[in-house]
Image (tube, coloured by chain):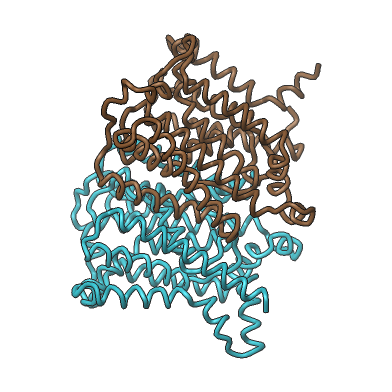
Amino acid sequence: MDWMNVARRHGLLVAFGLFLAIVASSADGFLTVGNILDVLRQVSIIGIIALGVTFVVISGRLDLSVGSMLTLLTVIVVDQHNNLGPGGAVLVTLGAGLLIGAWNGALVGFLKLNALIVTLAMLSLLQGLTLFYSGGSNVNVEGAQTTWFAIFGRGTVWGIPVPALLFLGFAVIASFVLRRTVYGRTVYAVGGNETASVFSGIDARWTVFLAYVLSGVATALAAIIMGSRVMGAQNTIGQGYELTVLAGIILGGTSLMGGSGSIWRTVTGVTMLGFIQNGLLLLGFPYYVQWLVTWAVIIAAVWIDLAAKRGRIIA
Amino acid sequence: MSMESAGQSARKTGFRAGDWLIRNHIWIFLAIAITVFSFASPYFLTLNNLGNVLTQAAFIGILAVGMTMVILNGEIDLSVGATLALAGALAIGLQPLIGVWPAIFAGFLASAALGFLNGAFVAFSGMHSFVVTLGALIGIRGLVFVYTGENALMVEDFSYTEIPELYLGPVSLTAMIFFGLALLFQWVLTSTRHGRETYAVGDNIEAAHDSGINIKRHKIINFTICGAMAGIAGILLSMRLGTAEPNAGRIWELWTIIAVVLGGTRLMGGYGTMWMTIGGVLTLAVIRNGLRLLNTPNYVELIVMGTVLILALALDRLLEHGRSRR
């Protein structure tokens, strides 16, 4: 076995293992079942959004609106729980996520507007809609602790948090869709070479449109979990999540250029991110240092990946 | 499609309404916005308020001048808001140690150096500038928090806050600096080799490389300019406020990109002018100022901005369609 080769191909995982060992030896309670389950619970919301955004990124686009979308949808699910009850709230939220995703998808897929700028515009627009919907105040759930709505964020099955199970379940489904269905293959084709995919008869407009719809629906699912976990919603609850989602996807090794990547890379990236931030937190580093280290890791990962592809790095 | 090819076709065939629209739609937007708010608010069209609009526009405007240079190269810089905060913090924080003017110079130098680092990293790593500068955004903001200890720094020597209190009629020094820098870099773009090559790199990077342009150098220079502009904006902002907030300029990178793209500069590079950027910055400032004069709630501004940007993109797309069909 060529250890150099292994280190090169899995350098990130090796570095991550080292990090885990260092944190585990210096912070009490890092490698305990309770803490690991906590991390899994924490990453599941980011993770579920990232599953949807992975489709968008592989198709060669970006979605920067998911953080604001999460805020709006969480406000909606909490508020509608008070109006319509748990069933109505879940349905309305999924519908709203589908609609926002479809709107993004129509602008980027069919009108072919620049994805980065459109979703930046949507970030601002959705923030405004959230404040409009909530009237600027925070929304709280009344009596939801007693309905089945509480299960999504707070329940456990055999001691494992339900959000983590949902994350894993959706990851299996998303991976199946991406790897085993015709639609999944068109996502890779469009992201890899859009012109070639169009010449080979793929309707790239629909592919991109559906990727954004998936991103919207995934964010709605995350919002349902978020609302159930927090039992309330602030107008800033999802702020900055789009960057965390992107960080997880990049850390997993999916290229922002599109055409390559996988759901399991995203799951790995998001989970590693969760452990890095949790570890730094347990070591007592302030919030911005967590972020500094996280981004240093991500940039190093992308750089090593690029350099290894060019054959510049031997070891 | 490059600016040159659009310009050349206009020269060959004489005046074309479509071509004129492609290059100047932002001035129509601006005229509409000014007209609407003139009718909606009696205070809007006063000399005093228009002067305010220019001063408010200047901070995003100076950032936008640097951002335009980077975007013309086909890159993007998400770290300008954090760089602005760092320059302001250094310019105020270093004053007790080294005096007012050296502190200003140190803030400026640090921001230019950060721009240089961004550019060097993008050029030599081959990484997407989106990823690099997103990292820089977080890293630089972290530095600001470390340096300021998460508190706002107050100015001690009040001569500092008097520096931008120079007015030419209703036009503040801050606004004049914005226009001066925009004109300077418009001159750089049209009349220097660096400017012409900036368009070439953004338009077709492989062709530019094959024709012997040093692409790495170009990107580094333009990122350095962008960082330096963020420094100037940050120092002017700290002069105006008399404090340096660690959170200063948060999400301003978004407003800056919005202003540049609203003006009609193509995000993919190769097409745009400082005039367009001035137009985009002024339109954005007029809309924000007008909505505030009308006492609209905060969310209206956010919704209007998002909608205006999507409309501008759709219009841009429409005009490009018209052009490619000809």
Q: Nearer the viewer, residue A178 or B70?
A: A178
Residue B187 horizontal/vertical position (percent): 51, 75
Q: Is residue A105 above or below residue B64?
A: above
Q: Nearer the viewer, residue B129 or B326?
A: B326
Residue B47 horizontal/vertical position (percent): 22, 77
Q: Nearer the viewer, residue B231 or A113?
A: A113
- Left or right, residue B55 beside residue A7: left
As drawn, the chain in cyan is B
Question: Which residue corresponds to the image point at 38% horizontal and 35% vertical from the top-left?
Answer: A89
- Left or right, residue A116 beside residue A125: right
Q: Is residue A254 above or below residue A147?
A: below
Question: Which residue corresponds to the image point at 66% horizontal and 25% vertical from the top-left?
Answer: A11
Residue B44 horizontal/vertical position (percent): 23, 73
Question: Which residue corresponds to the image point at 19% horizontal and 52% vertical from the top-left?
Answer: B157
> Which of the image's four quarters has the C terminus of chain B?
bottom right
Residue A84 horizontal/vertical position (percent): 33, 36
> Which of the image's four quarters has the N terminus of chain B?
bottom right
As drawn, the chain in brown is A
Q: Nearer the viewer, residue B298 or A174?
A: A174
Question: Which residue corresponds to the image point at 68% horizontal and 59% vertical from the top-left?
Answer: B214
Furthest-bottom residue in this view: B14
Q: Is residue A164 above or below residue A101?
A: above
Q: Looking at the rendering, which quadrant does residue A38 occupy? A: top left
* Whether residue A292 is visible: yes
